[in-house]
Amino acid sequence: MQTNKMSKVFLFGGIFSFLFLYIPLIVLILYSFNNSKINVGWVGFTLKWYKVLFADKEIIHAGVNSLLIAFTSSSISVVLGTLGGVALHRYKIPLLSALVMVPVAAPELLVGVSLLLFFLMINFTLGYASIILAHTAFSISFVAIAVKSRMFGMDDSIIDAARDLGASPFKAFWLILIPTILPGIIAGGLMAFTLSVDDFVITFFTAGVGSTTLPLAIYSMLKMGVTPEVNAASTIIILFTLCLASIATKLSPQIFK
């Protein structure tokens, strides 16, 4: 009897938490179809704000920049993060594992300020290159954690068996280890891509003059008020992020247990 009561409490608590989290997002998505320039009440259904959005050259340019930055930074993160994840699994150094978790656990404001100070210290010109380096810096940890989780419980003797059969270290790594941990690599890469596309805080600190991404462009639009065009742009980002997160979850479910 007591167990049933506790189960109901957890159930209602979980439902309330999800409603608290997703109702604002649902309202934002609904109002992107509102036939009114002022979001004070529902007037009627329309798709014109999406037409306005896709006709806005500045927004399209910022969106393309975000995708290129995300693709570049996530590609670099996949290579370095995979090597880091393999090293974490094999050597199991507690301090190294803690250091990998720092970019994940640290507040984005702190990461953004520290990267800005670093770029200024080495006299590195802020621009798209600095954004890519900054996104790579915090994305590597997500890929490394995903790869390490994928390797958990893996029988390392298969690598030794491949070496005994005459495979070189590179062939054993490329033909045996990589296919085994590929779902974790893809999941980590998708997470890195998603985080890069919708990152604002770190990008804000590391972007130079004239460097614009989609989150920065939306922030500039918000200065004029929350318009349905902003809602439409936000809706696209939300749906895009949910799709990539869902794919990453299916590819490597043990990471998200």
Image (spheres, rainbow, N blue to C red):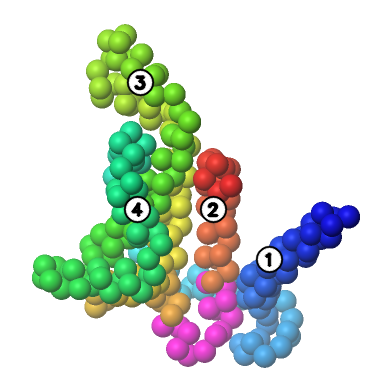
Q: Residue 183: image x %, image y %? A: 48, 37
Tags 2 and 3 touching, CB below 8 Å: no
Q: Residue 207: image x %, image y %? A: 28, 72
Packing grade of label 2 (10 A; few <14, some 14-19, many >=20) is some
Amino acid, disc 1: Phe
Disc 1 element: helix
Q: Please tell me the numbered disc located at residue 245.
A: 2
Amino acid, disc 3: Ile
**Spatial distance from mark 2 to mark 1, Cα to Cα?**
16 Å
Residue 112's quadrant in the figure? bottom left
Q: Residue at the location (52% across, 52% down)?
A: 244
Q: Residue at the location (25% across, 22% down)?
A: 169
Answer left or right for 152 relative to 20.
left
The segment highlighted magenta reads 220-233
Q: Which residue is mark 1?
A: 18
* First of labels 2, 1 by sequence position: 1
Q: Which residue is mark 4?
A: 98
Q: Residue 156: image x %, image y %? A: 39, 24
